[in-house]
Image (cartoon, helix red, strand yellow):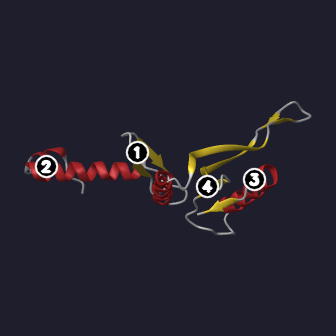
Amino acid sequence: MGLTQKEINRLSPAAQRKIRDAEKNRRESRTTPARKYHNTPCDYQMPDGSVKHFDSVKECRRFAELMLLLKAGEISELECQKEYVLIPATKRPDGKTERACKYVADFVYKDITGETVVEDVKGYRDPKSAGYAKFVIKRKLMLSVFGIAVREV
């Protein structure tokens, strides 16, 4: 708008507040980076009062569904963000270390039959995207290394 502080001070308190809020929103929108997959973070209130943070609304909703199944006794041993080492860290001939290749599952639980279920919540499935291609490779490694077929939700 280009108003000077002197001009802003002459305005009503309500108008000054609106200008301050608009400036604050403008600054925040500039400093908040766009999220890689355009997802919206979401929080889930646990029964004990703690808050569990999720990277997407879809992942949060799936957790809420799994919590109901857990309470109903349909599943057990629910874990979030469980890490699997697909390929351990190794030393190269030049002495440098190659990092381990890991897969982080969104949810891991045992179903009513006692089988371990690994779920990954996907907001989109674009075979052309590099992110999805990387997931497909890790999904295949999970089956090869651990004998676990990852379910896409």
Between the residue at mark 3 and the residue at mark 2, the CA separation in whole angstroms equals 64 Å
Q: Are the residues tagged 4 and 3 within 8 Å (C-beta)?
A: no
Residue at mark 2: 7
Query: Which quadrant of the figure contains the N terminus?
Result: bottom left
Q: Which amino acid does label 3 sit on?
A: Met
* Local secondary structure at mark 1: loop
Between the residue at mark 4 and the residue at mark 3, the CA separation in whole angstroms equals 18 Å
Q: Identify which residue is drawn at 46% across, 46% down.
A: 53
Between the residue at mark 2 and the residue at mark 4, the CA separation in whole angstroms equals 66 Å
Residue at mark 4: 111
Q: In this view, does 55 lie above or below 89?
A: below
Q: Identify which residue is drawn at 71% across, 57% down.
A: 134
Residue at mark 3: 142
Q: Which amino acid does label 2 sit on?
A: Glu
Between the residue at mark 1 and the residue at mark 4, the CA separation in whole angstroms equals 21 Å
**Is residue 73 left or right of 46 when viewed as pictured?**
right
Q: In which quarter of the image is residue 131?
A: bottom right
Front-most of 117 and 119? 117
Q: Residues within 10 Å of mark 4 (few under 14, many from 20)?
A: some
Q: Residues within 10 Å of mark 2 (few under 14, many from 20)?
A: few
Q: Residues within 10 Å of mark 3 (few under 14, many from 20)?
A: many
Q: Are the residues tagged 1 and 3 within 8 Å (C-beta)?
A: no
Q: Which amino acid does label 1 sit on?
A: Met
**Precedes in sequence: disc 3 or disc 2:** 2
Select label 3 or label 2 by which is in front: 3
The spot of residue 118 in percent (x, y) is 65, 54
Residue at mark 1: 46
Q: Are the residues tagged 3 and 2 within 8 Å (C-beta)?
A: no
